[in-house]
Image: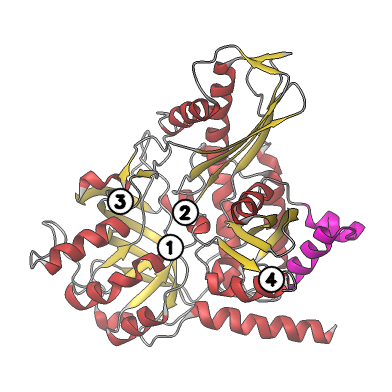
Amino acid sequence: MTVIRQQDFIDSIEDALQYISYYHPLDFIQALEVAYHKEENKAAKDAIAQILINSRMSAEGHRPICQDTGIVTCFVKVGMDVKWDKTDLTVQQMVDEGTRRAYLNPDNPLRASIVSDPAGARKNTKDNTPAVVHIDLVAGDQVEVMIAAKGGGSENKTKMVMLNPSDSIVDWVLETLPKMGAGWCPPGMLGIGIGGTAEKAAVLAKESLMDPVNIQELLERGAETTDEKLRVELYEKVNKLGIGAQGLGGLTTVVDVKINSVPTHAASLPVAMIPNCAATRHVHFHLDGSGPADIKPPKLEDWPQVTWELGSNVRRVNLDTVTPEDVQSWQAGETVLLSGKMLTGRDAAHKRIADRLNKGEGLPEGVDLKNKFIYYVGPVDAVGDEVVGPAGPTTATRMDKFTEMMLSQTGLLGMIGKSERGDATVESIKQHKAVYLMAVGGAAYLVSKAIKKARVVAFEDLGMEAIYEFEVEDMPVTVAVDSQGNNVHKQGPAIWKVKIEDMASAQ
């Protein structure tokens, strides 16, 4: 019988969560490097370059890859021949204690994103607990842990379906994936769970994302089982959709497809699909009673030496002097470097603004959006001499229901976020001659280096969802929707789907 110390388990959880906040899995980085060299769409290639550069910067600086440091998901497999040195804490409580310590680490504080009373007050728990813990009793005398920090943008794109036994899983995935938009920050991975019951399929899908990226090895040796054949078919067909990095169109939408399956009822075919984003973060370790897990850091020389060069069509914009007439000349797909002052605001701030405007109270003191840009972001707290912590964009579609109000009642000129906008929002942008700019999701530490000053101007009680004023210098963005309503997230994938089909037919 192996005795596992509670303290060793808690320390290992804390160390693992700090580790994955700034280290991508090396196999994922290697897959992104392959995608980078393969990519032919310049916009998508630039996006992958920013993700790779950000990854190396985070590894060097020990700061979060993404501002969304995730909800903790932990799979704990406890050997039947394991005994704990103390029994005053449950496994859930031990995971939560490790999570609490990791997220409150003063050297690398991680953004607390978990809210209690989810259908009501949605009050931040302040320490990112509780974690989501799945516990299994298994054979053996060790404790096995697989732990991940899952961002909300990708988690929100989870899809589940109860298919008929004769239905095609491939057809469902290919129909569903394009409707998910780019809020899950491709290129990433797809985890698919098949069988059991609905909740079992979802757990299977989530656990599959803990596996290493190995689709290329599978392609080389050839698929043998049903699940392996399905992985290969989906990997090839999903990438032929042309969605590409950040939904801009391109050759690589997924770097791998993972599948877990178990037996199911003869009348059922439950399927769950969960994407992992470009900020894929997970680690796997064992405890054997000899002490806490020894998680070896990767070598920095294993990161690719990728540079990101600005093209000749870059437009430099002073946010302090930009006018409505200026933005009408910006074109979808164009690269823009922003300098000057912008305000931030995401879900909770938009809701409060809407409530104030509906009551006739106007904007909060210190907030003037006339001819200004708002950045959809919830940054990580700063440490040391940082102005702000990692501050990448959040999914813009969540703000769609507020956009018409913001454009018509506040004089807002433009918005900055990640992923696509809905059809009604694009029409509103066109009607008001505004613009929507896209920053790269998964490049939060890189983006933060363009922020030279930051201060809270309203709703300080909202924490990371407060309204900040950022002063930026050469912050890179792409014109995703221009004032004419041209939309790169529709045009790009459509163009590249046809190009991929033409490339295949020419071979």
- Amino acid found under the numbered disc labelled 3: Glu
Nearer the N terminus, badge 4 or badge 3? 4
- The relative height of residue 223 versus residue 297 in the rendered view (above or below) is below
- The label shown at residue 395 is 1
Question: Circle 4 sits on which residue?
Answer: 164
- Number of marks present in the image shown: 4
Q: Residue drawn at (66%, 81%), measured in percent from left and top? A: 497
- The label shown at residue 465 is 3
Question: Circle 2 sits on which residue?
Answer: 152
Residues marked 2 and 3 touching at CB (< 8 Å): no
- Amino acid found under the numbered disc labelled 2: Gly
Query: Which SS does the magenta portion mostly show?
Result: helix
- Amino acid found under the numbered disc labelled 1: Thr
Q: Residue drawn at (58%, 63%), measured in percent from left and top? A: 160
Graded by Cα atoms within 10 Å as few (under 14), some (14 to 19) or many (20 or more), the crowding at tag 3 reads: many
- Expressed as whole percent of the image width and height from the top left, the position of residue 242 reads 65, 76
In this picture, which residue range is highlighted in magenta? 214-237
Graded by Cα atoms within 10 Å as few (under 14), some (14 to 19) or many (20 or more), the crowding at tag 2 reads: some
CA distance for labels 1 and 4: 33 Å
